Amino acid sequence: MKIARVHFYVEDATVWRDWFVRRLGFQAVAKHECSCTRTEVVTCGAIVFHLSSPLLPDSPVAVFLQKHPEGVADLAFYVEDIEAILAKAVSQGAQILQPLQEQPQGQGSLKWATISAWGCLSHTLIEVEGQNSHQIAESPAQSPVCFTNIDHVVLNVAAGDLERAIAWYENVLGFQPQQDFKIQTERSALRSRVMFHPRSRVQLPINEPVGTNSQIQEFLDINRGAGVQHIALQAGDLVGAIACLRRRGVAFLEVPPDYYTQLQKRYRLPLTPSQLQQIAQQQILVDWQEDGATANGETPPLLLQTFTKPIFSQPTFFFELIERRLGSVRGETKLAQGFGEGNFRALFEAIEREQIQRGSLHR
């Protein structure tokens, strides 16, 4: 189970192709056009995004945009046994939006089908027989910003749907629960469960609102249903990537200065003063397991994250940018895994500040 591509439905595919190229450093690699829809394909590292816009009112994209703002319509996965997954999906109440199709592909064959998921989201399932799945993807191009892959995709569902969504992804696609979060401030709250696939480590956090003031509820109201809130792009050098993106005009959520004051008070801060200064200058969140910092000079793996402001006209979808930094703990080299609760809370509070500025959340 691997993420094959993400399909955005937008008002103007050409405009958004140029935005991804100029702002995020993606490469435009292909264009597809049928009688009613135009699709632009952009890539960065192993990341593949399809951007589709309507040419005629009867385009599926036009129908989508009449019901929902611009955003993610389909999340495609490479799978190993598409027939078995389709059978499970139907047994769990999913609709088959595109029946199973097959065509010869090199020395093997390509099979695909699309099923309904939650709200406006669908999943295209792709099985490649006789060759590596990466051979059929659009050729990845080198980017000056150096995003390598998609770290995770975050899904927002309605209040009361979290457990059902967890069960659906577990029973149909084989995801497993990993981490639980409940974040609460004086104004609002959310519940979250991080799902991951045990073979590929693909991660899918699922959020539900707690209370009408929750930022998750605001997303659901504006999006008119469940959908993808954000996608995390992984970078090898997040500090350098953010500096580059700021020069390109990308807008980020602000991190208050006292965040870094509190960070310095945490147990055994695994950053030099110079490193902390660079991270604070780019307003990047940092987290680590404090019990992983040992007295013999070893450092725990670091989780670095930051978040763009919503990219579309409605305050729904945004990007997370993430670096999972290697550390040494008890003689073993490890990569940062999971999600830090401190960073999760900092993101929640940053979005709350944006809500207050929009007037959608009262102090």
Image (cartoon, grey):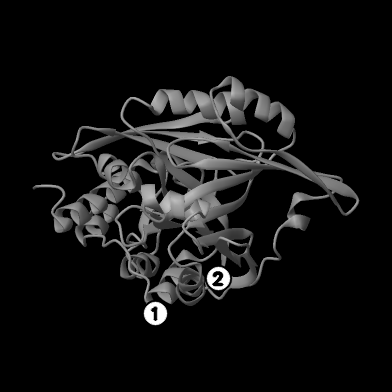
Question: In x, y percent, where is residue 123?
Answer: 57, 41
Res. 325 in view: no
Question: In x, y percent, where is residue 79?
Answer: 70, 39
Foreground pick, 300 / 167: 167
Comparing marks 1 and 2, which lies closer to the viewer?
2
- The part of the image, by quadrant, that contains residue 317 is bottom left
Foreground pick, 41 / 277: 41
Q: Which residue is mark 2?
A: 26
SS assignment at label 2: loop
In 3D space, how far apart are the residues under numbered discs 1 and 2 (Cα atoms)? 15 Å
Residue found at x 55% / y 76%: 144
| Residue farthest to the top, as pictured | 91
Disc 1 marks a residue whose amino acid type is Arg
Question: In x, y percent, where is residue 7?
Answer: 54, 54
Residue found at x 26% / y 39%: 217
Residue found at x 50% / y 40%: 204
Mark 2, Cα crowd under 10 Å, few <14 / some 14-19 / many 20+, is many
Res. 186 in view: yes
Q: Which residue is mark 1?
A: 247
Does label 1 or label 2 sit earlier along the sequence?
2
Labels in figure, total: 2
